Image (tube, rainbow, N blue to C red):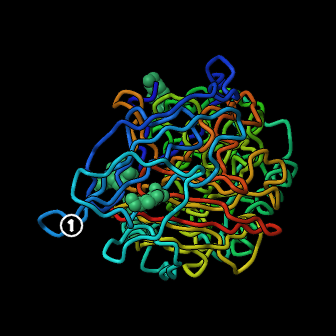
Amino acid sequence: MRPSWIPPVLTFALLSPVLALPHGGGDFCQRPPPSTVTVTSTTTLVPGYVKPTGPHQNDNPHQHDVPVYTRTGPDQHGVPTYTPASYSSTYTSESNYPTLPPYPVYNSTAVGPTGTAGPTEVPWPPVKTETSSVIPEPSSSSIEPVPSASCRPSAQYFDRVDKAPSVGTLRAAFLFVDFPDFPATTTVQDLFADYTTAPSALYKTMSYGKLTLEPVLIGDKFHRMPLNSADYNMSRGFSTEEHLKYINDGLTAVGDSASFENIDILYVLPPPEASTVTTSAATASNVTTPDNFVISNSITFGQDLYNTWGYKTLNHETGHTLGLPDLYPYDGRPTTTFAGGFDLMGLVAAQSPDFLAWHKWYLGWIEDSQVDCVIDAGSTTHRISPIEIASDTTKAIAIPLNETAYIFAEVRSKNGIDDEACGTGLLLYIADPAVERKSEPEGADLGSIRVIDTKPKSVGCGKTNDDSGVLNDAPLLLGESWDTELGIIVTVKEVDGDDYVVEVEKLSR
Ligand SMILES: *[C@@H]1O[C@H](CO)[C@@H](O)[C@H](O)[C@H]1NC(C)=O
Ligand SMILES: *[C@@H]1O[C@H](CO)[C@@H](O)[C@H](O)[C@H]1NC(C)=O
Ligand SMILES: *[C@@H]1O[C@H](CO)[C@@H](O)[C@H](O)[C@H]1NC(C)=O
Ligand SMILES: *[C@@H]1O[C@H](CO)[C@@H](O)[C@H](O)[C@H]1NC(C)=O
């Protein structure tokens, strides 16, 4: 199985089709019945947002209850303290559910000796009161986003050393091989035509014209491999050694019949009949061509190209040579566990296959100036245009959580290559390139990208055999708000044509 497999840093493979499990049972669309919610907590809060826990939490996944915090300090150190007031509120119908962002309301006018604040009836929906000048709590005034060059991940995660070029021309050699047990019955010209135009066009659109994938046909025929296809062990579970043996045998078979000059990446393709070559995989190992050029990134293709995923397999595997990770879990869970049907580095047949803004930033397809960076506490407003549309406008919001992790926000639409998307809106996800990927025997894979499900109780949309669909409706729509519970609250204030106007509330912690 996967244990003795390929070092994950060097090699990536596509999953064979996985039948994703349906999302549990029951009707997740139903709201909980009307309930009475009472705050009983008397916790004293120091400045900074402390998320309320306990009996005042309702079970509406989209909103949290919002107690009013009464300022009862300052304490002996001059630090203001807050006490949540008790309240109760009854929901009688779905429309009674609060729709305002779930920020705590600090009642800065109610200053009194510690512990003396009495129960306060909460205006409902809650009203955000003015904050005291001594407290750096969420303020309603906008602060300017800082330039995002300073927001970049450290060079370790952002440099492009040894990666295939992501901007300009990427010259890909197509080397067709066949085997004594599976001699080719088609011509290379037919396959070459089928698997060059569409992947190149896809990258052209995804990169806003910045990347040209230029196919170069090596020789005009299938090159005969010395071993039978079955002897190469090129089904799922092959080692880097086996992978390189296969690639080097292919290069040797070419002999001096073709030139590899100025080739950036190598594709090795079997005939569609070679049923024992099942899985496509990329490797970042150096190989030397017969005419003595070194190629640092190679991809071998299997039946999944022809029979399962189609031409986008080229875009997925080539994505690895550009430096992108797999977005599906390596620990055996369904393909769409982390990223749903967003970004073909997760599910190749995704409903919304365009690369995430996080990836486009790394690839140089969106510029630093198109990423708003939120560092300071407070409230900022951002106008974001869809990731699928070429423009020099803002494409994403980056909110660093610590030295390596970010919350990212971008707009997904039905434009461009995402025309079949069922889930559109403001997509939120956590990107943490420092996450060490784990495969089955090592334990749970945390994933370096995790879409935030803002509709955790819905069944989602766009269910297919490979995609349970649960994450596909994760994006926020107009008027919706999400508390990430990481001190970041995001609200869609306005939708103007294709653009989303988004408020980010960063709480001081
Ligand atoms: C804030 O406190 C003052 C004084 O106790 C009170 O009159 C007012 O109603 C409170 N505001 C809210 C929103 O609870
Ligand atoms: C394929 O696997 C068999 C059994 O493990 C091994 O003997 C053989 O050398 C492998 N083939 C290649 C090309 O490495
Ligand atoms: C691959 O070759 C390049 C030069 O072509 C070299 O800089 C790099 O260190 C080599 N990588 C490995 C892993 O040997
Ligand atoms: C950074 O934050 C992420 C998200 O909360 C967390 O998973 C990760 O462990 C944190 N990393 C460090 C080094 O604290």
Q: Residue at the spot x=29%, y=42% of the render?
A: 42
Q: Residues within 10 Å of mark 1 (few under 14, many from 20)?
A: few
| Res. 17 image quadrant | top right
Q: Residue under circle 1?
A: 79
For the residue labelled by badge 1, is the local secondary structure a helix, a strand or a loop? Answer: loop
Q: Residue at the spot x=58%, y=30% of the render?
A: 334
| Res. 107 image quadrant | bottom left
Could you say where residue 146 lies in the image, as x and y percent from the top left? Answer: 47, 81
Q: Residue furthest left?
A: 76
Q: Nearer the viewer, residue 486 or 423?
A: 486
Could you say where residue 353 lies in the image, as x and y percent from the top left? Answer: 71, 51
Q: Nearer the viewer, residue 504 or 122?
A: 122
Q: In this rendering, does residue 224 appear at all? A: no
Residue behind label 1 places its C-beta within 8 angstroms of ligand 1: no
- Above or below residue 413? Residue 58 is above
| Left or right: 69 in relation to 115 | right
Q: How many marks?
A: 1
Ligand number 1: quarter of image: bottom left
Q: Residue at the spot x=50%, y=28% of the render?
A: 332
Q: Residue at the spot x=73%, y=65% of the render?
A: 494
Give the quadrant of the C terminus.
bottom left
- Above or below residue 191? Residue 380 is below
Q: In this rendering, does residue 323 appear at all? A: yes
| Left or right: 217 in relation to 336 | right
Q: Nearer the viewer, residue 285 or 413?
A: 413
The residue type indicated by label 1 comes to: Val
Q: Nearer the viewer, residue 180 or 234?
A: 234
